[in-house]
Image: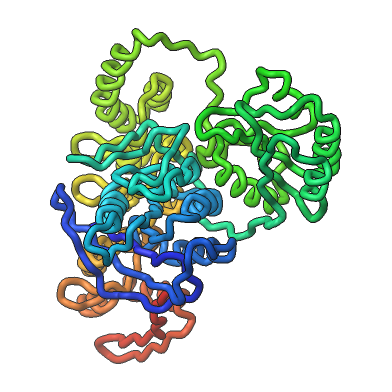
Amino acid sequence: GPLVGWTGACSVVPLLFHSAPISMLSKDNKRIIYTILEYKPLLDSSNMTTDDWGRIGKDIEKNYENYDGFVILHGTDTMAYTASALSFMCEHLGKPIILTGSQVPIYEMRNDGRDNLLGALLIAGQFVIPEVCLYFYNKLYRGNRVTKVDAGSFNAFSSPNLAPLATAEVDITINWDTVWRANTTAKFQVSTELNRNVGLLRLFPGITSATVRAFLQPPMEGVVLETYGSGNAPDNRLDLLEELKKATDSGVIIINCTQCLRGTVSASYATGKVLMDAGLIAGGDMTPEAALSKLSYVLAKKDLDLAAKKKNLRGEMSADLAGAKLCLSDSRFIQELEAIRDALTPPLACAAAKIGDKEALEAIKEMGGNLFLGDYDGRTPLHIAACEGHLELVEYLLNHGATVYAKDRYGDTPLCNAVRFRHKEVVKLLRKTGAHFSRDKLEEAGTELCSLAASGDLEGLKIWSLAGADLNETGYDGQTAIQVAQAVGQKEVVAFLVQLMSNRSKVTTIFHFSCFISLFLSCQTPTALT
């Protein structure tokens, strides 16, 4: 079943790693197996710093290929800040990372912790949602769109300007149209370099220019200015505007965000336009937490120009819908069209992928179809393209949101399909994007590798090796591929495996006997979380 890593909340030094997996059965009879990493000492979330975000991110990066998703237990006070920060730090993300916690501790008889934890585990273990998310009170939110709105309610978090990615009621319903996609062939990595010279400044009536001047002094490099309404500030306070202009001219990036819970920054009013003239950048509908995290992230990226820094990087703000027209009477018709589209898109897209029809896929995408949804067997267009060896189509799909971690009803990923049909270049591209075999597939691979070795199938062994399989995996009888090849006299296979493992281990001792070769390799114990 799917594997989920569970990272303990708010901590500095790892205490222990429960290597024995714990399992739970979902409604769809999928067994979700999870292991627990606990940190010591546990911190109150109010004490979190950027260093703690980096440690959590690095722990995820170390174990990224071992699990299908990650759940982070976190205190609620700064959970929105951590979720926003991790969303930017986790680059080219292809798996779910879900933060959750509780208002009432889980050891209390009446608490919200149990439901939040179970919901987060079920979603992380069943669905490939490649985002940093926050799960609370039966709703899954995009991590960088959330803010804490209630200190005394179980419904403590809200995503004011974006609907939840998923709701957990009788069934778990995913809003796939809202899910953010990396749209890249780059491999997952965590960027822990964050600029700490950023801050939040909230306007209030009567704020002095001296206060603003002091706040904008070096080493300040980025500021989130929380303004009135739709991004307004007093246009008759020339002293304030002058201080802001001096700061932006000196290279300080100032983001204009609204103090309101809902809504977006606009330059419709004269009091908003004066801030643009002073060099401030409109923050759209970003939350202050997201704007601050984004500033910290992009200011540490010295290779990014201002235009790149202003881009919508992780879905932290809504697209500009200026000019879009929608009548209220059209809503029911649109919902019906969307239902038809969602039903027809997967089989049509898979059919186009089978024959390598890129133009048809582009047309489906232009009509609003999701190219990453699976058919009745859970097979996505990427599965089909990988089966058929359509390299150009595989690259196109990866660049338009398809995920290499999608599994069909049999648990096969696109990488499994590419290996089975021996499409070498497709395997290379998928591996470059971060594709890897799941733990259960690797355990099953031993028998297949032994079969290939027995039949002298060098090409098959090479494609498995290219895909990242350990050719020293044992089969059902405890034999490895090299032992089977030795037993049946497949000398070419033995020579290939010896050379391959010699290159990997660097330390190999080979004893030659008349009938067989005994091979002793240095073994490296997998490193636990440290």
Which residue is nearer to you in this view: 202 or 79? Answer: 202
Q: Nearer the viewer, residue 281 or 334?
A: 281
Quadrant of residue 312 within the rendered picture: top right
Query: Where on the picture, by quarter, is residue 250?
Result: top right
Question: Residue at the location (73% across, 34% down)?
Answer: 280
Q: Is residue 15 above or below residue 136?
A: below
For residue 110, side relative to residue 301 (left or right): left
Q: Position of residue 460 (x, y in %)?
A: 31, 59
Residue that extends furthest to the front in the rendered view of this protein = 206
Is 249 placed left or right of 433 in the picture? Answer: right
- Residue 297 seen in the current view: yes
Residue 362 is situated, as x and y percent measured from the top left of the image, at 42, 24
Front one among 247 and 112: 112
Q: How is the image coloured?
A: rainbow
In the image, residue 359 lies at what x, y percent?
Answer: 42, 23
Residue 489 appears anywhere in the view: no
Question: Which residue is drawn at the image coordinates 23% and 68% (left, top)?
Answer: 22
Picture residue at 81% right of the left edge, 35% below the top: 240
Image height of 328 relative to 165, above or below: above
Is 156 left, or right, of 23 in this rendering?
right
Q: Would you place residue 186 above or below residue 53 in this image?
A: above
Q: Where, quadrant-wise, is the N terminus in this rendering?
A: bottom left
Residue for point 26% across, 64% down: 108
How many numbered marks does the figure carry?
0
435 relative to 270, above or below: below
Q: Position of residue 21 (x, y in %)?
A: 25, 70
